[in-house]
Image (cartoon, rainbow, N blue to C red):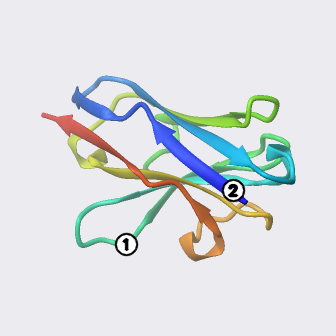
Amino acid sequence: QVQLVESGGGLVQAGASLTLTCTASLSSRPWSDYPMGWFRQVPGGDREFVASISWTGHTWYSDDAQGRFTVSRDNAKNMAWLEMNNLRPEDTAVYYCAADLAGPSFRANEYKWWGQGIQVTVSS
């Protein structure tokens, strides 16, 4: 009953900014019921926590994202964003948005619904 679609990825140079968008399609409960998170994954690696945001907009970040990335949401539009600044080559990954009815978490296995992922590539 929750479908998530990421958009806004692409190829950028180191130091650039990029904003990812997560758009939710919901069949019953409102988007405001769903804490959501952003994760990323490189080939052969696990999904790594990037940021999360609660129903009310409280945010959490990985140490790597803190100070460079900003997560936000608009419950009326069923959307969330991950603004990424000062991108580094090591930020290159497939980025996913995820949602669940439980509280926001940094653990990927605690999210039930996932988008298909979108590639972000940062060149040096």
Q: Secondary structure at mark 1?
A: loop
Instruction: Name the image quarter holding residue 2.
Output: bottom right
Q: Secondary structure at mark 2?
A: strand
Residue 99 % position (x, y): 67, 58
For label 2, count other residues whose C-alpha is less than 10 Å away and answer few (under 14), some (14-19) or many (20+): some
45 displayed left or right of 97: left
| Nearer-the-camera pick, 95 or 25 | 25
**Tag 1 or tag 2, which sits nearer the N-term?**
2
8 displayed left or right of 56: left
Residue 18 % position (x, y): 40, 27
For label 1, count other residues whose C-alpha is less than 10 Å away and answer few (under 14), some (14-19) or many (20+): few
Q: Is residue 61 visible?
A: no
Residue at point 62%, 53% (across, down): 3
- Tell me, for residue 46, which label it has, or none: 1
* Spatial separation of the CA atoms under disc 2 and disc 1: 23 Å
Residue at point 75%, 54% (across, down): 35
